[in-house]
């Protein structure tokens, strides 16, 4: 069996969407080996072409498009919600406030930097951001993943990145946060088959949430309780995560356009041009 290295984040939606493969429910033609890392580390390793398949921030993708194809599955979008810019209550933020973000190449960092160009940014593991704000290491921080569901009572929301996204996009598009990419050096037949496995894994997970979610809790793979896990999966690992739709592609393209317009990228790309050509399989077998 061919080995396929898969890297994903340790947050609940990524684990949920991958575990159908880990538990052997899907994908028995390959030996999948998974690694869980925080999102900025995943982005940095993708820049180094480390893993065959990796979760990434959508904002990173134009920087790795020559090495990785964009997958259509295991995606996370916000729809009326997303990362939150938080601060201490009664604190007024100056124009050049100091803020903690989860990584330089994250989607929330791109959107934040466009909105707040004078802010002084430090980067921290997403699990350390709330504490950094509470300890006055920074004036504010952007919470991601499960941290958006509950945070210390001494903190409040300064801004919703969903609202900023809507302002920048000037359209009611979903907020592109995280996706998956596959190394282009893999043979096309394998790439098509691996993407199929991943699509099936997310489909099986979504269809069997009542079985899979308790299994993740029992194995201590999740950082939140059962109620918050259900809420979080409703947000970021749902039927819209299985196979990207046209509005999601439009949203990714808008993110790339914003990044290009603000000099984050040297070249403007379109997401649909960087997908795995799965139609090849039909042509080959016809």
Image (tube, rainbow, N blue to C red):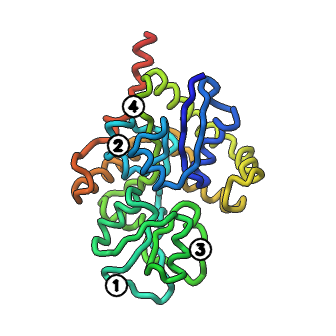
Q: Which residue is mark 1?
A: 94
Residue 101 at x, y percent in the picture: 43, 67
Marks 4/1 in contact by CB < 8 Å: the verdict is: no
51 with respect to 61 (left or right): right
93 with respect to 224 (left or right): left
Q: Examine the rendered structure and indicate whether residue 230 appears above or below residue 152.
A: above
Q: Examine the rendered structure and indicate whether residue 142 appears above or below residue 42.
A: below
For marks 1 and 2 on the same chain, the one whose residue lies earlier in the sequence? 2
Q: Which residue is mark 2?
A: 64
Q: Quadrant of the N terminus?
A: top right
Q: Which residue is mark 4?
A: 184
Residue 90 at x, y percent in the picture: 47, 89
Residue at image location 64% in from the left, 26% down from the top: 28
Residue at image location 42% in from the left, 23% down from the top: 188
Instruction: Work out how far the residue at label 2 is from the one at label 3, CA to CA, in angstroms.
Output: 34 Å
At mark 2, the secondary structure is loop
At mark 4, the secondary structure is loop
Q: Examine the rendered structure and indicate whether residue 206 appears above or below residue 3.
A: below
Q: Nearer the viewer, mark 3 or mark 4?
A: 4
For marks 4 and 1 on the same chain, the one whose residue lies earlier in the sequence? 1
Estimate how packed mark 2 is, as few (under 14), some (14 to 19) or many (20 or more) residues with alpha carbons within 10 Å: some
Residue at image location 46% in from the left, 63% down from the top: 102
At mark 1, the secondary structure is loop
Residue 120 at x, y percent in the picture: 34, 74
- Image-quadrant location for residue 199: top right
Q: Which residue is mark 3?
A: 151
Q: Nearer the viewer, mark 2 or mark 3?
A: 2
| Count of number-bearing discs | 4
For marks 1 and 3 on the same chain, the one whose residue lies earlier in the sequence? 1
For marks 2 and 3 on the same chain, the one whose residue lies earlier in the sequence? 2
């Amino acid at each position: 069996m061919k080995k396929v290295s898969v890297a994903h984040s340790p947050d609940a939606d990524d684990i949920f969407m991958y575990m159908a493969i880990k538990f052997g429910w899907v994908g028995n033609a390959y030996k999948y080996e998974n690694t869980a890392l925080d999102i900025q580390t995943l982005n940095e390793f993708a820049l180094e072409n480390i893993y065959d398949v990796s979760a990434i921030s959508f904002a990173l993708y134009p920087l790795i498009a020559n090495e990785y194809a964009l997958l259509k599955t295991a995606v996370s979008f916000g729809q009326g919600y997303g990362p939150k810019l938080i601060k201490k209550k009664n604190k007024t933020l100056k124009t050049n406030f100091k803020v903690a973000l989860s990584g330089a190449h994250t989607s929330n960092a791109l959107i934040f930097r466009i909105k707040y160009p004078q802010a002084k940014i430090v980067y921290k593991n997403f699990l350390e951001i709330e504490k950094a704000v509470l300890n006055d290491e920074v004036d504010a921080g952007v919470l991601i993943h499960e941290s958006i569901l509950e945070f210390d009572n001494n903190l409040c929301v300064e801004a919703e990145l969903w609202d900023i996204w809507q302002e920048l996009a000037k359209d009611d598009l979903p907020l592109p946060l995280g996706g998956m990419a596959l190394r282009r050096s893999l043979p096309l037949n394998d790439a098509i088959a691996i993407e199929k496995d991943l699509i099936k894994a997310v489909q099986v997970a979504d269809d069997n949430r009542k079985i899979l979610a308790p299994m993740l809790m029992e194995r201590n793979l999740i950082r939140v309780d059962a109620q918050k896990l259900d809420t979080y999966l409703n947000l970021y690992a749902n039927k819209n995560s299985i196979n990207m739709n046209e509005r999601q592609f439009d949203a990714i393209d808008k993110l790339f356009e914003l990044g290009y317009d603000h000099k984050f990228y040297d070249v403007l790309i379109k997401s649909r041009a960087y997908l795995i050509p799965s139609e090849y399989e039909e042509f080959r077998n016809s």
